[in-house]
Image (tube, helix red, strand yellow):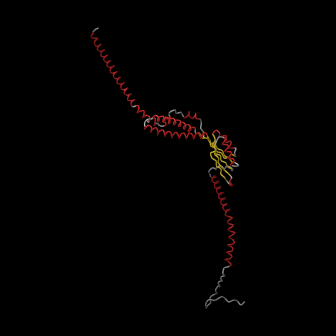
Amino acid sequence: MSTHGLRPTRRHGRRLATAALAGLLVTGSLAACGGGGDESGADSGAASGGSSQQDSVAGPQAKGGADGDRAVGAVSPESARASAGQKLVRRANLQLKVEELPDAASRIRSIAARQGGVVVSEELYSGERGRDTSGTVTISVPAAQLDATIELIAKVGEVQFRNSSSEDVTGTYVDTQARVTSMTASVARIRDLLSRASNVNDLVALENELSQRQAELDALTAQLDSLKDSVSMSPVSVTLSTDDYEPVAAGGFLSGLTSGWKAFVTSAAVLATVVGAVLPFAVAIGLVLAPVVWWLRRRRHGGAPLIPQAVPAGPAGPGGPVGPPPPSAG
């Protein structure tokens, strides 16, 4: 083997070793610089952490909308509706014909008390001689006792009209309840942030946000309480009358004809009443004035002066007018 062939190979290996050593040195220096930069960046981040943390207090957490708060612990509407159950608002109306209104109203009040309800309103209208002829009693009973209450009220008198209705408010109830839950949690978070805030600007911003969310929470709570009352209690309106119930006539020609006939009969009755009230006075005045008028007429004819009748003139003669003819000898 000749040395001439080995020299280029040794030189090439030395060059490779030198390049590798230089690469290692450059890599180590770059790593040192990067580590120092990271440490300086961490130090700068730690130095500015206090101010950034204070800004975040009044930032997205304080000024985030209620929609972001509702997303925490949100439940699907289907599962919420299934857990809440169906919510119905029920009410009923009855028309009763009774003998005595005060007694019927007293029995209805007793029924409401036995069923765990209350009397909402009571109105009785008096007719002739102070006798009650019609009235309305409205009670409110638990929804579970509505059917039993209707059956007991139907025994007070003769049922002439009966109506009951139900309204499904499950969706509104579940939505309002979910909004109350999320808003309560939101108010609690704002109070926690307010207790840890140390900047005046943050305190002012958090207090304004807290007042707005508290007002919304109060409104939602009142709406939910009203829905709970409507679902748990059912109103029953009872109309009492001593006369038969007359349903409202439908519109059309017959309805107009019936209304016109009733108006004519009413007007004729009013006219007859007026004539009957005036007739006694007219008769009394006539009895007084008739003799006076007769006496005045008789006095006028009896005391009148006699007026001589004019004598007709005769035919004119040649010497002038001729007087009346002489009386006959006979």
Give the position of the C terminus as an image quadrant: bottom right
Question: In this orientation, which residue lies closer to the viewer: 227 or 86?
Answer: 227
Location of residue 17 in the rendering, given as x and y in whole percent from the top left corner: 31, 16
Question: In this orientation, which residue lies closer to the viewer: 54 or 230?
Answer: 54
Q: Residue furthest right?
A: 330
Give the position of the N terminus as an image quadrant: top left
Location of residue 51 in the rendering, given as x and y in whole percent from the top left corner: 40, 33
Q: Residue furthest top?
A: 1
The image quarter containing residue 205 is top left
Question: In this orientation, which residue lies closer to the viewer: 75 or 269?
Answer: 75
Q: Is residue 174 left or right of residue 238?
A: left
Q: Residue furthest left?
A: 4
Location of residue 245 in the rendering, given as x and y in whole percent from the top left corner: 67, 49
Question: How many marks are shown on the rendered structure?
Answer: 0
Q: Is residue 193 above or below residue 132?
A: above
Q: Is residue 327 above or below residue 61?
A: below
Question: In this orientation, which residue lies closer to the viewer: 94 or 54?
Answer: 54
Q: Is residue 143 above or below residue 18?
A: below
Q: Is residue 8 left or right of residue 283?
A: left
